[in-house]
Amino acid sequence: MLIMAVLATTGSAASAETYIGVAVGTAPSISNAYVHQNDGRSGRLVLGQAFGFRFGTIAIEAEANRFDMVLNGIPSTSTMLGVGAKYSFPLSDGFSVFGKLGLARTWLSEDLDGPSYDGAGNGWYFGLGAEYRIIPLLSVFVDYERQSTTIDAPTSTTYGQAAGMFSLGAAFHL
């Protein structure tokens, strides 16, 4: 509803496009009492529909993130699926800055057998970054994304997981 109101007040759409992107990020900085170390890199897939206007671009974006960590000494994987809005503000000659905000569902699963900390929960994410359009069909971006989720484990344990990571990626505009 809010997006429709914004679209209505900014005038008619100058352009619309679909994009798909992929990014590789740093090992996440995780805020959680049970996580003692991060393990490897993070990865992200993005699918979006952007609408260009006189004062920038608004996109509806779906994303999937995944990273590994060690939870109480047990190798584990965190997977997040989210949907949100992204606003890009053009600066000059294909260069823009952006911010995004969305809702997410996160699953946590152990990679080994043993006492289970598997669980899932709902949360949110936000991000800030910059993007450069190399050619009409390709852009590169760098961003920082922060996720926050409350995980409910089957053992009735509830804990918060907040993860922040820097990423470098590319988007293909269709």
Image (cartoon, rainbow, N blue to C red):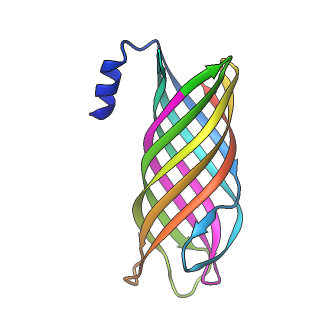
Answer with the quarter of the image where residue 142 lies: top right
Q: Residue placed at 53% from the left, 71% from the top?
A: 109
Say whether residue 128 is left or right of residue 167.
Answer: left
On screen, 14 above or below 142? Answer: above
Q: Residue placed at 62% from the left, 48% from the top?
A: 144
Q: Is residue 125 magenta?
A: no
Q: Position of residue 153 (x, y in %)?
A: 42, 77
Say whether residue 70 is left or right of residue 146.
Answer: right
> As rendered, which of 18 and 97 lies closer to the eye?
97
Q: Is residue 174 visible?
A: no
Q: Position of residue 139 (x, y in %)?
A: 68, 28
Q: Position of residue 21 (x, y in %)?
A: 61, 37
On screen, 166 above or below 107? Answer: above
Q: Is residue 72 magenta?
A: yes
Q: Residue placed at 29% from the left, 34% from the top?
A: 2
For the record, the magenta segment spans: 64-88
